[in-house]
Amino acid sequence: MSLQFEKGITVKLIIATIKPFKLEEVREALTEIGVRGMMVTEVKGFGSQSGHTEIYRGAEYAVNFVPKVKLEIVVSAAMAEQVVETIMKTAQTGKIGDGKIFVLDVQQTIRVRTGETDADAI
């Protein structure tokens, strides 16, 4: 797998949605490769699985949104491919609903405390 990077873009935002029970395993794997921080949000959504049905107290009902965890990770462009590969390898169960990964260019990054910018602010 090879990501295409725009010249001059030094920072990437990686957004990944994964199954909630994979969060700790993914966090550990990312820490091992040098990721120093991430934001995690509990979200609900649906993709190709379009939700599912469940039985509760004998009654069947539709679950239209499936629980997921959204990770937002800002890394240097040089590290982005390794982060994506680590998430893919660690979060994959082989079953529908394993999630998605999006990689976006970050135009500017600023650390509020120090005023550092771009890769220095990560």
Image (tube, rainbow, N blue to C red):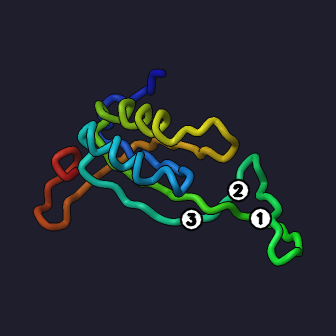
| Tag 3–tag 2 contact (CB < 8 Å) | no
The residue most toward the right is: 59
Q: How far apart are marks 2 and 1 (CA)?
A: 7 Å
- Disc 3 residue type (three-letter): Val
Disc on the earlier residue, 1 or 3: 3
Query: Left or right: where does residue 34 sit relative to residue 21?
Result: left
- Disc 2 residue type (three-letter): Phe
Task: Name which residue lies at 34% across and 41% down.
Answer: 29
Q: In which quarter of the image is residue 82?
A: top left
Q: Quadrant of residue 100?
A: top right
- Packing grade of label 3 (10 A; few <14, some 14-19, many >=20) is some
- Helix, strand, or loop for circle 2? loop
Residue designated by label 3 = 43
| Tag 2–tag 1 contact (CB < 8 Å) | yes
Q: Where is residue 90 in the image (x, y as percent from the top left)?
A: 46, 38
Q: In which quarter of the image is residue 5?
A: top left
Q: How far apart are marks 1 and 3 (CA)?
A: 13 Å
Task: Name which residue lies at 80% across and 74% down.
Answer: 56
Residue designated by label 1 = 64
Residue designated by label 2 = 46
Task: Name which residue lies at 56% across and 65% down.
Answer: 43
Q: Where is residue 102 in the image (x, y as percent from the top left)?
A: 51, 43
